[in-house]
Every structure is written in structure tokens, then in C-alpha cells.
Image: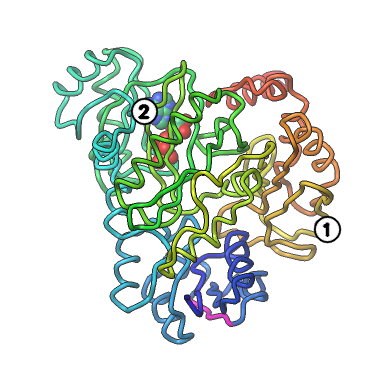
């Protein structure tokens, strides 16, 4: 078993991983920037190492500092959390070359899935359904026109190196294709350093449904059901639930089996998520995330499986602790991402939290690393906590969530809590009747009402 884990992250996810390590009796090393010296993950870890100034580039993204921190502290493994270096194949390689275990998949798998075109080709090879589109990169305008004509408008141009919902352009008519293609290429070059793009059919009203998997790296893999993450703003997830209110038992079983078989064939190691758009009873692969997801707690709530325990166990060379026939999904779980942002215009709202009171009671989980008197630094993302609620069914879960939101108090800064208080009262949300555009439409209507 791994003896000492360095957690190459901050905030709630660093704390989440730390908790799992403590439960498994593994020593922990926190790393932090100068602005995070008083952060909760630093206080709770057995040891900590300062890895640089506040800017992410110089601290949490600084591979050499992190490897040096491993050597100083004598860590034998690194858990990358999500974001930062979690999907950086080079980082995984550097660690392995220093004899340090990367708690995640092989660098080869990270690399394949980080390249959207390679990922899509791999998905096809593994029998996963994909969105119709170009077979690979689009070389010029003529090819783009041909592909778009074949699959039919609207289409979406996507950056091969894209991520975080950026670098995408929707094209509704042939007349707009050329201009959008040029814009997509230059935007992608500016953001990701590559102007490689590809084209897909644009689905008008899909849901975002993703399946959690874990593999042992030796050809065994299981799935832990799906999460519905259709409530998004600017392609960023806001509310996630498991199971999806839109799936029937047959489709659920079908996609779970496809994904578990594909992950086993790939020889995938560790936790991963395969993301789909789902429309009219069909699934379309969009990407695979080769790491723990922000929304993993909803899966933990319904399955009772601690995903970080499993990640550590597999990285230590052990087998999966569970088999597919022992995975039962029980009840319903919803996660709300609470951000330090204005709930109307979503501008970041860093600063001093003067009072922080979290809800409690049966079925409530709070994953957060903030506290009363904590000053949110302006350098990082605005997630300050996740409220995860579990109930025996969706109705109970929603009733409990409504009550929990009423109990949650964050003073001193603006947060997105009021947004959830609106959502929980909405009949579409109550009915589970929404798609990936629903939230943006709802926010636009609300803005119009105010005007
Ligand atoms: P990223 O890696 O940038 O997050 P994804 O490929 O996962 O990009 O897509 C992010 C979001 O963009 C999806 O959740 C969905 O809302 C939207 N999207 C992506 N592809 C399509 C498509 N073919 N049709 C409609 N919407 C899409």
C-alpha cells in the first residue's frame, strides 16, 4: 500500500482526498501557494510544502516544484484531484520517471483522451456511439462544407485541444460556415495554442449524461451508473444528479454495459468518466475525463462507494474492492455547486467570508474548504463548496435540498445560493424536465423580467 500521498491541489478537492487518505491510514502532504498558507487543506495535512506565489502557473501548475515537494517530503504517490495537472500526461510521466505513483490512469490513456479527435476514434473502436461528424481534423473550407452538408445543419465546430466548454462555434447555415471556421481556428489558436478543429452535428436539445467507471488497469472495469449534468451555464455544470430523471432502466443498462466493456477493453486504470449527449433515446460520446470529477459525490451518495478509496487502492496495485453485481444504486442524489459569484451576473465575488453556516441532518453532505473568517483569494476558481443531498427518491431528495438551502448561510460575499433557491421552486426542475440549454434560457427570461 502507498504510505504517503502528496495532494497536488487545493480547496475542497484537496480536503476530500485528504479525508480518504486519513481513513486509509495514509500520511498526507499538502502543497500550497503563498496565498493558501492558512487554507484548510494545509491545516489538516500531516505535512505541507509551499510551492510558490499565488498565480497557478507558478504554484499548482508548476510540475517541477511539485516533484521537488514530493522528494522533500518523501511522498511515494501524488493525487492530482481535478483541474490543474490532473489530465496532464507529461506530469504523470515525470512522476513515474521519479518512481512516484501517479494516482490516475497511464499517461498514454490521458494523452489519447486529452486529444478530442483521438478520443473519438478510440470511442468508435471500442464500440461507443459518437456524434456524427468529420472523421478527423478539418483541413480546409471545402472539406468543412462537404462534412457539414453530409451531416446536415446545424453543426458545431470544436477545437481538437479544447476543454472547459471553450473553443466551440455553432453554425446554422452554409452561408456562415467559412466565417465561423476562421473564427473557431483563431480562437482555438489563442486559447489552446493549436488551430486544429473538427465538425460535429449540433444536437438541439440533448441532455448531458455521463457514466462513472473504475478500472483496475488489468482488464477489469465496472460502471457506477450515470449522472445527469444537463443544468449548465456556459458549458459549466451547475447542478448534477444521479440517477438521471430522463433515463429508463433499459437505456441505463445499455449505456452502463457499453461503457464498462469499453473501459475493460482499453485496460483503463483508475476512475474515469465517459460523457455523452443524450437525445431521443440515443447516446452520443463527447469526451472521456481521465480523473475524478467535481460531481463524483452524487455517485458516491447513491452507490455508497468511496471513489477516492478505490483510486488509491488501484494505484497501490490492489484489485477493485467491488464487482459489478455488487453495485446497487439506491435513492437519488443532487449536487449544487456553490460559487463565490454574483447570482445575477455571475461576476466573481472573492473576499472575506464573515459568517459560514452549513446545513446538516440526514442525507446532507457538504464538501467545502472554507470557514467563517476565511478570505477567498482572487487567483483561483470560484467554487466554495458543494452541497450534496441524498434521499430515498427524487421527491424526498428535492424536499431535503430545499430545506438545506434555507439553512445555508454565507455572509460577506455574494454566492450562487439564491440561484438554487429559484431552481428548486421551478416546475420543470421538479419534473426533471430540462436539457443542456434550459438554464441559460431560464436566466435569460429572468433577466428580461427584471428589465
Ligand atoms: P469541453 O471539453 O470543452 O467541456 P465537451 O465536448 O465536453 O467540451 O462539450 C461541452 C458541452 O458543450 C457539452 O456538455 C454540451 O453542452 C455542448 N456540446 C458539445 N458538443 C455538442 C454537440 N455536438 N451538440 C450540442 N452541444 C454540444
Classify 115 as above or below 345: below
Residue 76 in picture, x, y percent from top left: 43, 79
Q: Residue under circle 1? A: 355
Q: Is residue 50 magenta?
A: yes
Q: Earlier in the sequence, mark 1 or mark 2?
A: 2
Classify 2 as above or below 247: below
In the image, what residue occupies the spot 56% across and 33% down? 228
In the image, what residue occupies the spot 62% across and 23% down? 444
Q: Is residue 128 left or right of residue 81?
A: left
Disc 1 under 8 Å from ligand 1? The reply is no
Characterize the local packing of mark 2: few (<14), some (14-19) or many (20 or more) Cα atoms within 10 angstroms: many
Residue 177, picture quadrant = top left
Residue 286 in picture, x, y percent from top left: 38, 34
- Identify which residue, 386 or 213, lies in the foreground: 213
Magenta region: 47-51
The dominant secondary structure in magenta is strand
Q: Residue under circle 2? A: 169
Residue 284 in picture, x, y percent from top left: 38, 27
Classify 76 as above or below 299: below
Q: Is residue 232 magenta?
A: no
In the image, what residue occupies the spot 83% across and 51% down? 360
Residue 59 in picture, x, y percent from top left: 46, 70
Q: Secondary structure at mark 2?
A: strand
Ligand 1 image position (quadrant): top left
Residue 183, picture quadrant = top left
Amino acid at each position: 500500500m502507498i504510505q504517503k500521498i502528496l495532494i497536488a491541489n487545493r480547496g475542497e478537492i484537496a480536503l476530500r482526498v485528504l479525508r480518504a487518505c486519513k481513513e486509509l491510514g495514509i500520511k498526507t502532504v499538502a502543497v500550497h501557494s503563498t496565498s493558501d498558507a492558512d487554507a484548510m487543506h494545509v491545516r489538516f495535512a500531516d505535512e505541507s510544502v509551499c510551492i510558490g506565489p499565488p498565480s497557478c502557473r507558478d504554484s499548482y501548475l508548476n510540475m517541477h516544484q511539485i516533484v521537488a515537494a514530493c522528494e522533500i517530503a518523501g511522498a511515494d504517490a501524488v493525487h492530482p484531484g481535478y483541474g490543474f495537472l490532473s489530465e496532464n500526461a507529461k506530469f504523470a510521466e515525470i512522476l513515474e520517471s521519479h518512481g512516484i505513483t501517479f494516482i490516475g490512469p497511464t499517461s498514454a490513456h490521458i494523452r489519447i483522451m486529452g486529444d478530442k479527435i483521438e478520443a473519438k476514434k478510440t470511442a468508435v473502436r471500442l464500440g461507443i456511439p459518437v456524434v456524427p461528424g468529420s472523421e478527423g481534423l478539418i483541413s480546409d473550407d471545402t472539406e468543412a462544407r462537404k462534412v457539414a452538408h453530409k451531416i446536415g445543419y446545424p453543426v458545431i465546430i470544436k477545437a481538437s485541444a479544447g476543454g472547459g466548454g471553450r473553443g466551440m462555434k455553432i453554425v446554422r447555415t452554409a452561408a456562415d460556415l467559412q466565417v465561423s471556421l476562421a473564427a473557431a481556428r483563431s480562437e482555438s489558436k489563442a486559447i489552446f495554442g493549436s488551430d486544429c478543429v473538427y465538425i460535429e452535428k449540433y444536437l438541439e436539445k440533448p441532455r448531458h449524461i455521463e457514466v462513472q467507471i473504475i478500472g483496475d488497469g488489468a482488464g477489469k472495469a465496472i460502471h457506477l451508473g450515470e449522472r445527469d449534468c444537463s443544468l449548465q451555464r456556459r458549458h459549466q455544470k451547475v447542478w448534477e444528479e444521479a440517477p438521471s430523471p430522463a433515463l429508463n432502466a433499459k437505456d441505463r443498462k445499455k449505456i452502463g454495459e457499453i461503457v464498462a466493456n469499453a473501459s475493460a477493453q482499453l485496460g483503463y486504470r483508475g476512475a474515469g468518466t465517459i460523457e455523452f449527449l443524450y437525445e431521443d433515446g440515443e447516446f452520443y460520446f463527447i469526451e472521456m475525463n481521465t480523473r475524478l470529477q467535481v460531481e463524483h459525490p452524487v455517485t458516491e451518495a447513491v452507490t455508497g462507494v468511496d471513489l477516492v478509496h478505490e483510486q488509491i487502492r488501484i494505484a497501490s496495485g490492489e484489485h477493485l474492492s467491488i464487482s459489478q453485481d455488487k453495485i446497487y444504486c439506491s435513492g437519488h442524489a443532487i449536487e449544487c455547486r456553490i460559487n463565490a459569484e454574483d447570482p445575477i451576473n455571475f461576476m466573481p465575488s472573492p473576499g472575506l467570508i464573515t459568517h459560514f453556516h452549513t446545513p446538516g441532518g440526514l442525507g446532507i453532505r457538504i464538501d467545502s474548504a472554507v470557514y467563517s473568517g476565511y478570505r477567498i483569494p482572487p487567483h483561483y476558481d470560484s467554487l466554495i463548496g458543494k452541497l450534496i443531498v441524498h434521499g430515498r427518491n427524487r421527491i424526498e431528495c428535492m424536499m431535503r435540498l430545499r430545506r438545506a438551502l434555507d439553512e445555508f448561510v454565507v455572509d460577506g460575499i455574494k454566492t450562487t445560493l439564491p440561484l438554487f433557491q429559484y431552481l428548486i421552486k421551478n416546475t420543470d426542475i421538479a419534473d426533471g424536465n430540462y436539457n443542456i440549454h434550459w438554464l441559460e434560457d431560464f436566466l435569460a427570461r429572468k433577466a428580461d423580467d427584471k428589465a
